[in-house]
Image (spheres, helix red, strand yellow):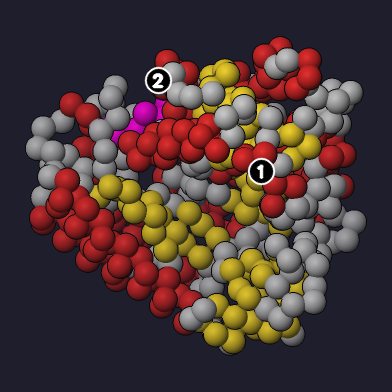
Amino acid sequence: MKYSVITFGCRVNQADSLGFEEEFLGAGARASTPEDSDVVVVNTCSVTASADQAARQTIRRIARVNPDVKIIVTGCYATRRPDEVAALPNVLRVVPNDDKPHLLSLVRHDLSTAERFGDGDGSCGSVIEPGVAGRTAFTLRVQTGCDEPCSYCIIPSTRGGPVSAPLENVLQEMNRVAAAGFKEIALTGVHLGSYGRDLHPQSSLIELLQALEGFGRGCPSGRPNGVLFRISSLEPMDCTPELVDLVATAETFAPHFHLPLQHASNRVLAAMRRPYRIEYFAALVERIRALMPHASIGSDIIVGFPGETDADFECLSAYLEASPLTHLHVFPYSDRPGTVAAQLPDKVHGLKVRERAGRLRAVSEGLSKRFHESQVGAVQRALTIDDGSLVVTGNYLKVRIPPGLPRNVWVDIRLTGAHPLAGELV
């Protein structure tokens, strides 16, 4: 049987999809394109209305070009609107987020005898290796769920409350992934900073990172030829001084932060129910920049939140332009039914939201350009990806280098150009 997995949204979904890939391969299925697959899994996002629309369009397109395909839909959109998703063409089953661990067994029961997998049971851990699903780095979910009360966010209702993987389980998985040949592992969670608070006894993200720092140093090949850990999106209030100091001093961690700001107006932050002020965020990123001059610091921004005035937007734009951030993900606000924000008055007109989003995307381009130019001449440790002529540095730059190396090799490069990013081996 031939399968394909299509993923929308966050790194948590990417981690879940990598697990689907491993289970399918372990069960004897063969990876293929959506156009030529017997079964396609679509792992959806629902953070915005456009994310829902993208999933619907993709499902319809697959069904149109591959009329016999069986489509399994999971993820946050499938969890939030299961009946709506089930009505789309060729959808065989809708799997909510809570049932993702059982997706393979559910698929088995739904398929005809002719379409079923080979003799594997999906439990074989040896099938995963760098290059599966086109990924050189491994994305590991160590936590899921969230109970933060952000007024615009639907994710707590689609992912549930916080659930952390026990530390011993995480370390076992690290050993398995490292033994399979992965040299970079991205740690992710729906609310990563809450890691360990639900465990008994309680733990914390910093305890997990300290354990992983020891794991990285203990790799047989040793750092920097061993495992590099990349911390994915981290809420600003969870990025403690202790955590920043650890990343700054331990070679085990990539100098890369993604800290969702969402807005720079304290009035809007309060309406969003974000538990910090812009002064806190600004001091945090300035401290990271002082300790790690080459660090990449990205952020998420919501533009057009209900009640956002011209003055609020100018406050946001002015802060971003002068900030040490290196790139932005700009999200035009859209109502999510069931959230507090959806009931707020003073909605911003769609044309104005789009205009503001365009301005901030231009700001993001300027920040990236400035950061890229600042790195020219710097020597960075990097991992080859794809065909080996592209590398990803610790500070999250994708740099083109001369061909000749395979995928998944550590190299030292010197950046020689910023537009486009290019480098040479040293």
Amino acid under disc 1: Thr
Is residue 289 or residue 321 the one in the foreground? 321
Q: Secondary structure at mark 1?
A: loop
- Tell me if residue 331 comes above or below residue 408 in the rendering: above
The residue singled out by tag 2 in the image is 84
Q: Quadrant of the C terminus?
A: bottom right
Residue 93 lies in the magenta-colored region: no
* Mark 1 or mark 2, earlier in chain: 1
Residue drawn 63% across and 76% down?
Answer: 400
> CA–CA distance between discs 1 and 2?
25 Å
- Tell me if residue 372 comes above or below residue 307 in the rendering: below
Span shown in magenta: 151-157
Residue 208 visible: no
Q: Quadrant of the N terminus?
A: top right
- Tell me if residue 114 comes above or below residue 33 in the rendering: above
Which corner quadrant of the image does residue 384 belong to? bottom right
Residue drawn 35% across and 73% down?
Answer: 366
Amino acid under disc 2: Glu
Disc 1 packing (10 Å; few <14; some 14–19; many ≥20): few
* Left or right, 56 with reference to 115: left
The residue singled out by tag 1 in the image is 33
Is residue 263 or residue 8 the one in the foreground? 8
* Left or right, 331 with reference to 188: left
